[in-house]
Image (tube, grey):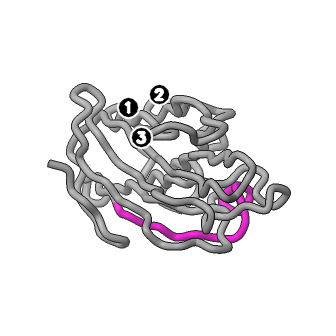
Amino acid sequence: MAISLEKGQRVSVTLPKFTVGLGWDANSASGADFDLDASVFILGENKKILTDDYFVFYNNIKSPDGAVEHTGDNLTGAGEGDDESVKVDLSKINTAATELCFVVTIHDAASRKQNFGQVRNAFVRIYNQDTKEEILKYDLDEDFSIETAVEFGRLYKRGGEWKFEAVGVGLKGGLEDYLSKYN
């Protein structure tokens, strides 16, 4: 049975291989399609990206160590379940990596006049790649009325153990703001 997380809650992740699924529904009254993009920042002890190649997103779908792989860009968010997902294999992760931040941004948010206040049913979940069994899920039930980017969660290493934290922190900006933060 999956663990349902609250904002700020942390849980150990003992499975070495899993998939992180991110999902959302656009408010139908908003008009234009919503193109939300999942990204992963693979950080070292200094809270910075190991190298540019360790920023995994729709234009760089695999980390150099092969530990993190984006499965593809969903341009509309249509359909049920995960809209975008990322496969993680901690047995391959670069030994310098201490944190993976999972971020979702709205593509062209400013020109389309879109924000996370127009997004509903947003979630992040971790599930077993082989059995499809859901291990944990975090539903973002907050109204991010002006934010155009949200850090859904983070996986971090402490004392040799990996833990997942439900973050749910938004900002008014975009991918560039996270790049500035983690570069």
> Pointer 1 and pointer 2: residues touching (CB < 8 Å)?
yes
Q: Assign a secondary structure to mark 2.
A: loop
Q: Is residue 92 above or below residue 154?
A: above
Taking the spot 74% from the left edge, 57% from the top edge, the residue there is 176
Mark 3, residue position: 81
Residue 73 image offset from top left, x and y in percent: 61, 34
- Give the residues in magenta: 165-181
Mark 1, residue position: 92
For the residue pair 158 and 172, the one nearer the viewer reads as 172
For the residue pair 94 and 86, the one nearer the viewer reads as 86
Specify the amino acid type for callout 1: Lys
Answer with left or right where residue 102 lies relative to residue 73: left
Q: Which residue is the extreme one toward the front?
A: 29
* Real-space CA distance between mark 1 and mark 3, rounded to the nearest whole angstrom: 27 Å
Mark 2, residue position: 66
Q: Is residue 178 above or below residue 87?
A: below
Q: Nearer the viewer, mark 2 or mark 3?
A: 3
Q: Is residue 34 above or below residue 56?
A: below
Residue 139 is marked as none
Q: Residues within 10 Å of mark 1 (few under 14, many from 20)?
A: some
Q: Is residue 181 visible?
A: no
Q: Residue 28's quadrant in the figure?
A: bottom right
Specify the amino acid type for callout 2: Gly
Q: Assign a secondary structure to mark 1.
A: loop
Specify the amino acid type for callout 3: Gly
**Is 169 part of what is drawn in magenta?**
yes
Q: Which residue is the extreme one toward the right?
A: 111
For the residue pair 123 and 52, the one nearer the viewer reads as 123
Taking the spot 36% from the left edge, 33% from the top edge, the residue there is 89
